[in-house]
Image: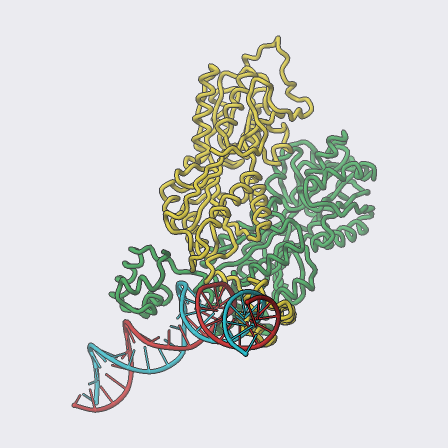
Chain colours: A green, B yellow, C cyan, D red
DNA sequence: TACTTCACTGCAAACCTTTGCAGGATCACC
DNA sequence: GGTGATCCTGCAAAGGTTTGCAGTGAAGTA
C-alpha cells in the first residue's frame, strides 16, 4: 500500500534511479523529466522513506536530544532553541526524557544511535567514562558537563555562583548555605567549588546541605534543616529548588527575604512569577541549545561523506572537533534577597519589597552579557 | 567500522541468519550456539541496527509524540506518562515540539511517519480534515481533540468549565468573563459551550474575551481589558493564562480574589506555588498519556503482522479501532476565588486567604475522581 | 532397517533507496 | 564525417536485517 520510488518510476515511465535523482540531485535530471516525475509523485502521494535513505547514505537528518527531566522548566527553552536551529539546517530533533536515571540515559543513547546523526546529552547523570565509551557509537555533544576529548557546551555557573555569593556578602550575610543538587551533576561540583572560594574570600561561612532532588519538593523538604542551620542566606542548586525552599520556609513561618535571603540558578520563567520574585543566576539556555546543535552538525559535516553506510564518520580518529564552549551567566537581582545581619545601615541597600529592579548586579560584582560564547 | 550481524556471524562461525535469530527469535536456536553468538556479539560490541530492522519488519518500536508547546507545563506530565508506558512495552518515544504552528505539525507527521509505528497528536492546531488525511499515512491517536473515525483521548473540560462556573455563581458572581484560548483548539470550543450553558442556567452573564495566546503573556496582556469589562470573576483557558492575568491585574492594582476571582484549567504544578494559589480545573494529563499510548499500541498490534514492509497495517480499512475515551476532570478550589458581589452573607463562605483547603467542590457541584477512563 | 519427526541451520530474497559506472543521444567543431 | 564533449538515463550493487523455505543430522518409532 505505501507508495515507493518504484511506483513513481512505473507511473512516469522512467527508471527508479531517475526518480531518486529527482529528489536527491535534481540538477542531474532533465527539467522535462523532472516535472513529469514530480507530478506523478505528487499524484501518488509519494514520500521518500527516510529509513531506507538513511540505511545507504548514513545520514538520517535527525538529531537526538537526551534530557534529564523535561518537567524541569530549565530545559524547554533549550529544546526549543535546538529545534529551531536544527530546522534551519533541515534536521529534525527527537527529544527523550530519562527521568534523571543514568541507566535510561545509556539505553536511550543506544536506541537512538542508529536513528540519528548525533546526540545532544544534556546534564547527563552517567559517568564520564561511560560517556566517552558511548561517544564511539554515535557522535555526541555534551551540555552542562565537561568531558575531556568531547565537544561540550558549558555554562559558567562557577562565575554565577561567585557573583551570587558576593552579592549576598555585599548585603551583609556572613553565614550562607549552599543547597546541593544531584551528586553526579557537573554543575553541582562547579558551584560548590566556586561558592566555597568566594565565601572564603569574603569572610563568610558556607554550609553545604545536600544532595537534594533538583525540584520544588527537594527544596521544600530541606526547609526545616535550613532553618535549624541558622544561616541568613541560601544559594540553591536551581530555581525550582529555591522556589520549593521559599514555600517550605513560608510554611515554617520564616519570611523571605526578611529573615532568609534566597538565590536560585537558571532564571526560569517561573522565577518572575512567584512572590517574592526570585533573585537568580540566569543561564543562557537558548544559546546553549543553538551552540550544541551547531557543534554537532559541524562535526557531522566534517566526517567523510564518501564513506558509505551507517555511522560513517564515527570512526575513532576521524572526529577531532573537541572544542569546548563556555557560556557566560548573569546574576539577576529581584526580591528574594535582602540585607543580612551584618548589613551596613549607612549604605542604602536594595529595598526588599520594592518594584522588581531586575537590574544587573552593581559594579563591584562582575557580570557579563548573557549568551556570548567564549571558546576555550 | 560499525560492527554488523555479519561480523558476529564470522566470529562465531555461523550464518548471519542464525545471529539474527539469536536476537529476534532465541527459541529457534540451539542454546549452545546461542551463548556462543551472544558472547561474540558482546565481545564485538554488536548492536542491532534498528533502522535496517525496521526496513524489513515494518516495526520501528518507536512512537512519535507531537506537542504544541513543550514549554507549557501542562505537557511534561503527559510526556512522562506516555514515555513510561511505552517503555514498559519496549517502545521508545520521540517528542517533537511544533511551537503551536500547524504547518510544523504537518511537516513533523510526515517526517516521523516512516520512523515510528504511530504518532500521538497532542492538542493539534491543524484542521480535522488534514488530520484525517494524515492518518492514512501513519497510525494516529489524537489527544485533546475530537476527530470522528480516529481514536481520541479527551478530557472532559466541558464538565470542568461547568463546575467552575457553578462554583463562581455559588460564590455570588453574576458577571463572569471567559478568557478564550487558541481559536483552533477543541478544548477552547468545549469550554465556551459548557461555560455558556452553565452561566445561562445560573443566571449569570458570560463575557467572552479572546482568543489569547495560551501563555502567561497572553493572560497579562488581557488584564486591562478584564478590568474595563467590569466582571467580578474570570475563567481562563488554562493555568498559565490565569497566572499571567493575576500578575497583570496585580500590576493594575486589582486584587485577586478580593476584587476579581480567577479560575484556571490544568492544575499545573505552578498553580500551587503562586500567590494566591490558583483555583483550577485539574485535568488528568498522566492518564491521558498512558491511555493514548495504550490505544496506539493496541491498534498497532491489531494490524496484520504478516504483511511485510513499512507501514504494514496502515492500509485503509484495516484499522478500525476508533474508540474514543473521555477522562474526567476535577475542580480544585484554592485561594484565587472568593465571594462575589451577590454573595449571601448569611452563609459562611470559604475564607479568601486561609490555608489552602485543597478540597473538592461541595456537594452541589458534581466532581469526579480524576483519571477514571470512561469509554464512549 | 526404514520411515517419520524434530530441532536446528543455511540460503537467498526482500525491504527502499542511493550512487558509481557506463551507455546512448545530441551537439559543436574541426 | 569524425572526434570529443555534454547531458541524461539505466544498470546493478550496496546498506543491515528478517524470514519462508529447504536441507541436514539425529532421535524416535514401527
**Is residue A358 or residue B369 the one in the foreground?**
B369
**Is residue B53 or residue A222 the one in the foreground?**
B53
**Residue B112 visible (yes or no):** yes
Q: In the rendered view, tell whether residue B368 sits above or below residue B129.
A: above
* Picture residue at 55% right of the left edge, 26% below the top: B263
Q: In the shown orientation, is residue A251 left or right of residue B21?
A: right
Q: Quadrant of the C terminus of chain A?
A: bottom right
* Picture residue at 76% right of the left edge, 29% below the top: A253
Quadrant of the rendered image containing residue B366 = top right
Q: In the shown orientation, is residue B376 left or right of residue A350?
A: left
Q: In the shown orientation, is residue B130 left or right of residue A284?
A: left
Quadrant of the rendered image containing residue A72 = top right
Instruction: Residue B155: give x, y in percent of width and height.
Output: 51, 34
Q: In the shown orientation, is residue B273 left or right of residue B162?
A: right
Q: Quadrant of the N terminus of chain A?
A: bottom left
**Residue A138 visible (yes or no):** no
Q: In the rendered view, tell whether residue B7 sits above or below residue A263.
A: below
Q: In the rendered view, tell whether residue B68 sits above or below residue B18.
A: above
Instruction: Residue B56: give x, y in percent of width and height.
Output: 46, 62
* Picture residue at 48% right of the left edge, 15% below the top: B202
Instruction: Residue C5: give x, y in percent of width and height.
Output: 53, 65
Amino acid at each position: 500500500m505505501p507508495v515507493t520510488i518504484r511506483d513513481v518510476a512505473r507511473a512516469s515511465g522512467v527508471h527508479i534511479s531517475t526518480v531518486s535523482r529527482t529528489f536527491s540531485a535534481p540538477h542531474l535530471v532533465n527539467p522535462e523529466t523532472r516535472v513529469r516525475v514530480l507530478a506523478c509523485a505528487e499524484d501518488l502521494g509519494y514520500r521518500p522513506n527516510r529509513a531506507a535513505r538513511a540505511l545507504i547514505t548514513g545520514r538520517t537528518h535527525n538529531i537526538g536530544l537526551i534530557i534529564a527531566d523535561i518537567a524541569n522548566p530549565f530545559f524547554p527553552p533549550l529544546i526549543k532553541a535546538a529545534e529551531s536551529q536544527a530546522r534551519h539546517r533541515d534536521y529534525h530533533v527527537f527529544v527523550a526524557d530519562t527521568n534523571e536515571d543514568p541507566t535510561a540515559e545509556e539505553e536511550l543513547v543506544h536506541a537512538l544511535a542508529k536513528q540519528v546523526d548525533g546526540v545532544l546529552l544534556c546534564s547527563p547523570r552517567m559517568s564520564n567514562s561511560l560517556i566517552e565509551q558511548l561517544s564511539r557509537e554515535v557522535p555526541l555533544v555534551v551540555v552542562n558537563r565537561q568531558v575531556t576529548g568531547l565537544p561540550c557546551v558549558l555554562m559558567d555557573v562557577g562565575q554565577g555562583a561567585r557573583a551570587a555569593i558576593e552579592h549576598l556578602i555585599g548585603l551583609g550575610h556572613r553565614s550562607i548555605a549552599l543547597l546541593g543538587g544531584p551528586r553526579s551533576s557537573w554543575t553541582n561540583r562547579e558551584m560548590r567549588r566556586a561558592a566555597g572560594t568566594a565565601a572564603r574570600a569574603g569572610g563568610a561561612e558556607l554550609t553545604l546541605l545536600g544532595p537534594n532532588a533538583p525540584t520544588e519538593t527537594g527544596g521544600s523538604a530541606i526547609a526545616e534543616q535550613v532553618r535549624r542551620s541558622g544561616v541568613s542566606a541560601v544559594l540553591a542548586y536551581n530555581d525550582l529548588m529555591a522556589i520549593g525552599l521559599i514555600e517550605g520556609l513560608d510554611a515554617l513561618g520564616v519570611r523571605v527575604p526578611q529573615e532568609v535571603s534566597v538565590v536560585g540558578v537558571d532564571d526560569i520563567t517561573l522565577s518572575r512569577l512567584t512572590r517574592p520574585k526570585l533573585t537568580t543566576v540566569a543561564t543562557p539556555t537558548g544559546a546553549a541549545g543553538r551552540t550544541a546543535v551547531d557543534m554537532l552538525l559541524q562535526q557531522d559535516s566534517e566526517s567523510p561523506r564518501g564513506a558509505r553506510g551507517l555511522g560513517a564518520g564515527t570512526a575513532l580518529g576521524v572526529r577531532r572537533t573537541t572544542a569546548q564552549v563556555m557560556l557566560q551567566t548573569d546574576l539577576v537581582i529581584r526580591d528574594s534577597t535582602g540585607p543580612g545581619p551584618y548589613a551596613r545601615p549607612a549604605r542604602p541597600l536594595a529595598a526588599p519589597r520594592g518594584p522588581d529592579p531586575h537590574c544587573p548586579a552593581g559594579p563591584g560584582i562582575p557580570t557579563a552579557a548573557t549568551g556570548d560564547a567564549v571558546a576555550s
